[in-house]
Image (cartoon, coloured by chain):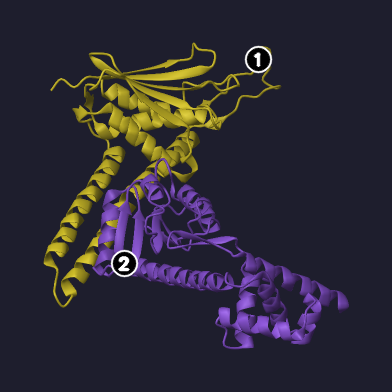
Amino acid sequence: MESISAPSSHLGATKSENPPLQVPWSERERATRLALAGELVAAVTHDLRQPLTAIEMNLSAALVFLSGAEPRTDRAIEALEDIFAQQRRMSEALQALEDLVVCREPRHERCDLTALAREAIALIRADPSMREAPIELSVGSQTPLPSVSGDATLIRQALLNVLLHAIDASGGRPGVPIRSAITNLEDSVEAVVTYPKPPETAVTNTGPGLTLARAVVAAHGATIKIDESSESTVSVQTTWPVYAG
Amino acid sequence: MQDDAPLVAVIDDDAATCRAVSRLLDAVGYRVRTYTNPRDYLDELDVAPPICVLVDILMPEVDGLALLREMRHSGSDVPAVFMTGTGHVPTVVEAMKEGALDLLSKPFTADALCATIARATDSSRRVHGERRDLVDLWRQVEKLTPREAEVAALVACGLLNKHVAMRIGTKEKTVKVHRGRVMQKLQAPSLAELVRMVDRLFSEQAPFVKLDGVEARRPRAADIITDVISRERSQSQKQV
């Protein structure tokens, strides 16, 4: 059976004093998959509840407008047009879900990395337990930032995973911010997430979130680098190629 | 839409939800003001308060719970109905603790929304009516002199004119004159009505209330009445 061994806390530790932590790989993989599925379901459920509410309200309003003694067809038409817009919004949410769970080649379209980072932060804050997550976002002064080439759904998911990894790794210490920055590097655009270094000596460049982010980065010809040289912080830098048309 | 139709404020950062809820409420006869940013609502707190506020719990910057806290802190007691897209139990519990009148879980039906808003409207009207009555009572009580306020309280406690005269150190005849003025100034048709008025002043001792955005303060005569009743009640307890 495949297993993961936790590193000994000190070199002199013997096997009997400090036995390696045996975690079956299949169990770990299943737990990872369940955690990702949970996040996914929460995000998609939230994305569907809003348009569903709007559709119900618009349909009922249209019925009221049409069933009066003097039908207000113009108002009913407005409501029905809004229903179409909300139906498209639901389709997009479902498409995003499908894109995440179905294996396929990533699209190469024009993407706004700043907007995707903002969406990833909004998705994190949609979870009530993360509402107060201290995440800051800064954007380089060279505006407008060039678009990057890639699959918006996957890039957003990669940024989301890096941020979730940062929250997990920094232990969610209240008041200690996680800083994210988007910078123009001419032929690429860089997204850097910096978080406080965990107090204990822990392996910070692994975890299910980063594994998924690495896979997305590789599929886009982008790069990911983890910088632990600072005494107080860890930075995860992802660099995305600029869209060339 | 009639100008005197009840006004509902809808606050949701999702513009499509805001528009759709507002459209339905408009269709069934409410006036609606919508806000996609809670700060804009807080900036307009003093402008014609709505009969109820329908607010999303999860919003960036200021969420629904923080908004309600700020409203209450600013003296606004407009009934709040929360909308939520999450079944997160602690959030729901917190919302109810903050004094939400009701909570609608998205996606909710038009019937559920209309029933909840109707309930909130009734509650708001009842509170508004009670407050108007209290302010009207304060306006009448304000006309009493300190001595008349004292007589009003003692009479309402069930004392006979001669006993009132002994308490305040005057003649029974003078008490009769004061009592007549009290009944006239308070427009109390009977002793029973005077007792009801005085009881209300004793049971509601808020120093001020806001009515239609205007602050009304409790008059000094109302405090005199409350003090006299407290004193009388503590004396009768000692005697028992």
Q: Which residue is mark 2?
A: B110
**Chain B, which colour?**
purple
Q: Quadrant of residue A210?
A: top left
Q: Amino acid at mark 1?
A: His
For image coordinates 22% across by 30% down, the residue present is A105
Residue that lies at the very extreme toward the bottom in this rendered image: B190
Q: Nearer the viewer, residue B128 or B187?
A: B187
A244 w.r.t. A229: above or below: below
- Give the chain coloured yellow: A
- Circle 2: element type: helix
Whether residue A206 is visible, yes or no, is: yes
User: For the residues carrying marks 1 and 2, which lies nearer the camera in this image?
Assistant: 2
For image coordinates 18% across by 74% down, the residue present is A67
A97 w.r.t. B180: above or below: above
Count the numbered circles shown.
2
Please state the horizontal and vertical placement of residue A12, each as a whole percent of the image: 68, 12
Q: Nearer the viewer, residue B28 or B158?
A: B158
Q: Which residue is mark 1?
A: A10
Chain assignment, label 2: B
Chain assignment, label 1: A
Please state the horizontal and vertical placement of residue B107, each as a whole percent of the image: 34, 59
- Circle 1: element type: loop
Is A221 on the left-hand or right-hand side of B114?
Answer: left
Is B180 on the left-hand or right-hand side of B23?
Answer: right
Q: Residues within 10 Å of mark 2 (few under 14, many from 20)?
A: some
